[in-house]
Every structure is written in structure tokens, then in C-alpha cells.
Image: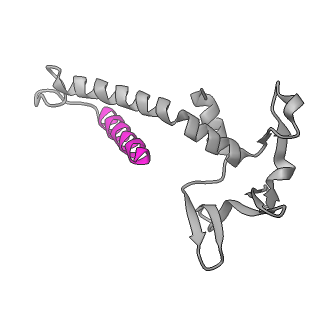
Amino acid sequence: MTTLEEMSRLAVQATARPWNWNVSLQSKQVRLEGSPKRGVETVLDFVRWGMDGAQPRFRSADCLMVKTETLAVPVEHREHHAAWFRDIDHPDARFIVSSANSHDALLAVAMAAEAAIEHEDTRPGGPNDPGVLWREELRLKRWALRSALAALRGAQT
């Protein structure tokens, strides 16, 4: 499982988010795009590979699209399979895998935190007790946690 520190590092290295798919039926192209402040950037797209295949391309640091075959690296401890089993050495490729692999763990953490908040809400002297003044910082954290949980639940469907 990916650690929170690793997830943070991968998120910083990856193309700015939010990301979205762009499918053009007219030009028969599929792209994953990022929407940074300076305009839309292609995160990855696909190009023909051989007679009956395709490969993704990723955006390089100098904003050129680079074919996956040039980014493919042997997998540690599986070097003997390097001809037919490789990984992609690119920040966006690693971020995509990390995000997918971490989703269930993040959802579990968020749900546990929500349960703790619900327990706090029903505790005598909790935020529903009009005699208690809760700090604004705690209210903001509770709102941020609930927003994050709602986003994770939305990604689930």
C-alpha cells in the first residue's frame, strides 16, 4: 500500500489537477487532460503501436508527448521478464496507479474519522450543546473532513 508521504510526493510531481477525459468522436482521439491555470494540458493520449495496437503517451517536462515505449523500465526483481513486463517511469503514470491503489484505504480512514466526529457530536458537551463554544478551527476541520469524505464517496460511484 502507498503511504501518505508517498502519495503527497506523487501528487506534487504529477500534472496539476483536476483531470478529465476528453473523447472526440469526430477525430477519434481519447485524451486525459489536466486543467492548470495556464490552460488545458494533455496528461496522456494514445497513438498507434504496430499494426493492431496502441500505446499511451505522456506529457514530458518540456510539454512534448512521449511514447510509453521510451518510458518503459524493467520491474525490480522481474528483470528476467523485461522483454514483456515493464513499468512506466513517469510521474503521471505513477500517480494514476497510486491513486487507484490508495482509494480504499483513504475511504476507510475518512469513514473512521467521520464516525469519530459523529461520536463527538452526540457526546455531552459536544457541538450540539448550546453551552459549549467550539473553536472555529475545529469547525473548519470537521467541514473539510466531511467534504473530503463526500468527494471520496462520489469517486466510488
Q: Which residue sits at x=65%, y=73%?
A: 28
Q: Is residue 152 magenta?
A: yes
Magenta stretch: helix, strand or loop mostly: helix
The quadrant where residue 72 appears: top right
Q: Residue furthest bottom?
A: 26
- Decide which of 4, 111 is in the foreground and name it: 111
The quadrant where residue 77 appears: top right
State whether residue 75 is above or below residue 125. below
Give percent across and percent down for residue 13: 69, 45
Give percent across and percent down for residue 69: 84, 51
Q: Residue furthest front?
A: 52
Residue 155 lies left or right of residue 60; in this view the side is left
Number of marks:
0
Residue 78 lies left or right of residue 41; in this view the side is right
Give the residues in magenta: 136-157
Q: Which residue sits at x=83%, y=48%?
A: 71
Give percent across and percent down for residue 34: 61, 60
